Amino acid sequence: MKNVQELKIFVRDNLTDELRELETKRKDVLKKIIMYDSALTLVYGIILYFIFQNNALPQTIQPLAVTYFLFFSLVIYFTSRGYTSDYKNKVIKQIVSFLEPTLTYNPETCVSRQSFYNSEIFREDATTYKGDDHVSGNIEKTSLEFSELDLSYTTGSGKNRRTVQIFKGLFFIADFNKNFKGRTFVLPDFAEKLFGSLGSFFQSKSHSYGELVKVEDPEFEKEFVVYSNDQVEARYILSPSLIKRILDYKKKANKRVHLSFVDNKLYVAVSFTKNLFEPRILKSVIDFAPIQEYYEDLCLAISIVEELNLNLRIWAK
Amino acid sequence: MYAILVPVILIIVVIGLVYNSLISKKNAVDNAFGSIDAMLKKRYDLIPNLVDTVKTYMTHEKETLTQITELRTKAMSGDLSDNDKIELNSKLSKMMGSIMVAVENYPNLKANENFLQLQGSLNETEEQISASRRFYNTAVTDYNNGIEMFPGNMLAGMMNLSRKTVFEANEAERQNVKVGEMF
C-alpha cells in the first residue's frame, strides 16, 4: 500500500498544474455563489421589509425562512456542480489510479440498490438512495467494488414527518476467498459494551439475523456481535486469523464497521458522518491536507483486501 | 392461602426454566459433537482421492499412505468409542499433515492440476473440522457454565449432569511435525 510520502511526491509530480487550474475555477465558483446568494438575500430583505410594513410577520416567517435556505443551498449546488465533477475527474481519479492502477473510478455512479440489499445488513427499505464515487475492478485475485452511499427513509405524515438515516458511509463488496452456503453477520456490538454479559443475554433473543454465535476472542466479542444461520459455517468463515484481522481493521478505521458474508461475497459497511471525497469550496485547492484525507478514506476501502487477506486462495474456490 | 400460592408458582416456573435451559445446553453439546462427525466424514471421503493422486509420485511415502488408508477404514467402521475415534483422527491428522509437507519434494506433483484442487479441498475440510471443534468447545463451555453457575448448579446434581471436557489438540497433534524425523 502506497504511503503518504509517496502520495506527496505523486501529487507534486503529476497534479500541480491541474490543481492550479482547479484553484482558479474554485475562486470563480465562490465569486458566483457570493454574487447570487447576496442577490437572493437582498430580494428576501425587500420582501421581509414589505411584510413587516403590513404586519404580516408572524405567519410568514416560517415559509420565508424555509424557502430562503432552500434557494441558498440550490444556488450553491448548481454553481458548484460542474466544478465538483471536474475536481473528481481530475484529482480523485488520479489518486485511485495511483493507489491501484487496476481500479476504475466513476464519480457519478454508486453501488446498486440491489447489491446493497443483498448484503442483508440493513433491512429497512429506503425512500432516498443516493451515492457517488464508485470504484471497481480487481486487485490480484479479488474482484471488488465500493462507493459512498447515503440512504434514509421517511416516516410519519404531515407534522410528524421525519427522516431516519439507514446508512451513510463507505460500502464495500468483494469476492470472499472461501465457499459457503449460508449467511453470517458481524455487527457492531452495542449491548455487550454497555451491559456486559447481561447484554449478550438480550442479544441472543434477536433472531432476525440468525443464531447468536459466540466467538472465542473476548476482545472481538466486546466490539462485535456475530449472527449466523449455521454455527459451524460461521466459524469456518471466521477463522481465528480473520477474527484478528477484522478487529485490527476496526481499530484502525475507528468507525462503526458492519460485515456480512452472503452468497460467497463479503460486504463491509463503514459508517461515516462526513461526506466523502467532496472538494471544498471555501478553502484552497492547493492544500495537501484534503488530498491526504481522500487518500486515507480511499485506503480504508482498498486496504480491506490486504487487511483481511482476501487474496489468500488456498481453499477450493 | 393465595399468599403462598404465588411464590410457589414462581418457584416452579423458575425451576422449569432452569431445567429446560440445562437440557437445551446438553443437547447443544451433542449436536455440536455430531457436527464434528459430519466434518470428519468429509475428510474420510477425500482420502481415497488423495492417496490415488499422490501414490504414483510419492514413492518414498508408500508406508504412510497405506497407514492412512487403514486408519480411514477403521475410523469409518463405526464401532469405536468416542475416545478411540478422537485418537484415531488425530493420528490421521498427523499423517496427512506429513504427506502434505512431503509434497514439497515432488515439484511435478505440486504443479499437478488434480493435486492443487485436492489440496484446496483438503484445506477446506481441515478448516471445517477445526470450525466444528470450536463450535463444540463453545457448546461445552456454555454447558459447563450452566451446570456450575447459580442457579443451574442446584439442579445439575439432581439431573445427573456432570462437567464435560473441551476438545483439546492432544499431545501428538500439538508437537510440530518434525520434518527431519519423517524420512
Image (cartoon, coloured by chain):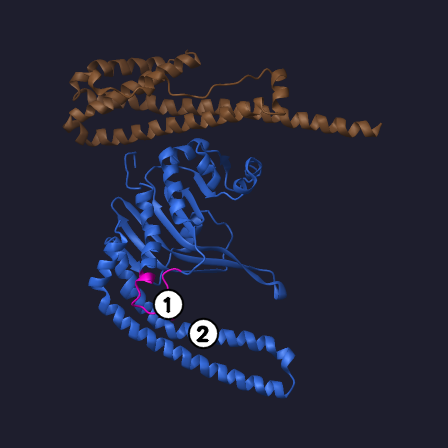
Chain colours: A blue, B brown
Q: Which residue bears the numbered disc 1?
A: A280
Majority secondary structure of the magenta segment? loop
Q: Residue A240 appears at what percent x and percent y?
A: 38, 33
**Residue A210 rendering spot, x and y as whole percentages:** 50, 38
Nearer to us in this view, A48 or B118: A48
Q: Is residue B95 above or below residue A309?
A: above
* Residue tagged 2: A74
Q: Quadrant of residue B89?
A: top left
Q: Which residues are magenta?
A: A276-291
Distance (Cα) linking label 1 and label 2: 16 Å
Please give the label number shown on residue A168.
none
| Residue beneath the point at 16% across and 18% down | B59
Q: Please state which of residues B25 and A249 is positioned toward the viewer in this rendering.
A: A249
Q: Amino acid at mark 2?
A: Leu
Residue A8 appearing in the image? yes
Please say whether residue A81 is one of the residues in the magenta stretch.
no
